[in-house]
Amino acid sequence: MLLQRLTLADFRNYSELDIEPTAGLNVFIGANAQGKSNLLEGIAMLGTGKSFRTTREADAVRKGFERALLRGEAALRAGRVELACSIERSSHGTRKSYTLNSAGVRYANYLGRLRVVTFVPADLNLAGGTPGARRAFLNIALSQSEPAYYYELARYRKIVQQKNALLRGTIEADVELLETYDRTLVDAGTAIMLARDRLIRALATSAAQAHARFAGNESLEVTYQPNVAFQVPTSEAIRAAMEARLAHSREAERVRKSALVGPHRDDLGLSLDGLSLAAYGSQGQQRTAVLALKVAQYAVMRELGGEAPLLLLDDVLSELDEERATAFLAEIGEYEQAFITATHLPAGLPAAAHLACVAAGRVRIGVPC
């Protein structure tokens, strides 16, 4: 999978941009607040249709304008694909639309065409932040790789909202309706938990291997911590466990007026040499572990999708020592296509890396800053 052309119009600080990235490692260098992160955000939005920086996507439209447009051309194993995402803001709110090969499509049909793996400073929350950040990490990886997962996740979230409304008394109490909601939660929840279990097992192996390459004297362990414990990862076992937990928690849910059981309360466990990474890991250890997790995500998504995703890395080297940074750069230099930002030329950069200078919303390919 190669992104061969990227066009931005009125996106962040880019009035217009048209570049042709190359295969291999693309390194964008420039001072802070010049547009490096904006560039990676634009590439990511072409893949996921969403910003990794804000939930207020109207902010991505350049000040003084009403519409931002992102376009990309990519070469996939299945053939060439053209993607576009537009963001329009008005007094009535924000509207996004998507096109695939010049035809308008729904978001569900757009997602996953151009797969991306991102690492931005906020991703350090994977190590020390809330379970919600780690669930989002799993959801993004699986939604891009498995269309059925996105469908089940959307169905599950809708039913959780409806169940919570019923428990809060927003809608009239109805025992039969509550049982219907629970049956749907079991159906969708079982599919979600099975997919997460498969992904995390694959991530665990790959992340441990990657971490050993970056920090050979420490051992990283990645584990699934489901809200509903199950003995074996089968549909039957998970369904039975979830049904039992729902029955046991019915009174607690009524008292607390909230859905307490299901994968919306799952977590991803990260430990280093048997100790919690969040509780005992230094910032450097957490950063290295998250890098290993992202490298693992790249490898697993490549295996699941049959081709390599794009790797987007925003300011990932600033807190790594030179030895770890060099090891990391050597690894991603072998990837099909990766994009990395930095404020200065990184030490240990592979000779084959392609440099570009970013300044004031302009990108000059092949020109060091």
Image (cartoon, rainbow, N blue to C red):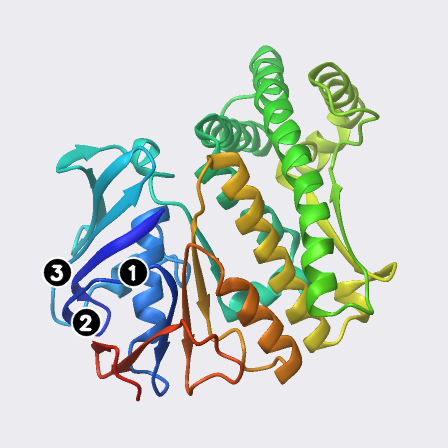
Nearer to us in this view, 127 or 260: 127
| Residue drawn at x 25%, y 83% as measured from the top left | 367
Q: Is residue 116 above or below residue 227?
A: below
Identify residue for label 3: 66
Q: Position of residue 253 (x, y in %)?
A: 70, 32
Q: Is residue 345 left or right of residue 195?
A: left
* Residue at the far top in the pictured view: 176
Counting residues from the start of the chain, the first of labels 1 and 3 encountered is: 1
Say few, some or many: other residues with alpha carbon within 10 Å of mark 3 (under 14 / 14 to 19 / 20 or more): some
Q: CA distance from mark 2 to mark 1?
A: 10 Å
Cα–Cα gap, marks 1 and 3: 17 Å
Task: Find out whether the residues at labels 2 and 1 contact each other: C-beta distance under 8 Å.
Answer: yes
**135 and 315: which is toward the camera:** 315
- Depth check: give the residue in front, 297 or 347: 347
Q: Left or right of 300: which side holds 222?
A: right
Disc 2 element: strand
Q: Which residue is mark 2?
A: 14
Q: In the rendered image, which residue does mark 1 sit on?
A: 42
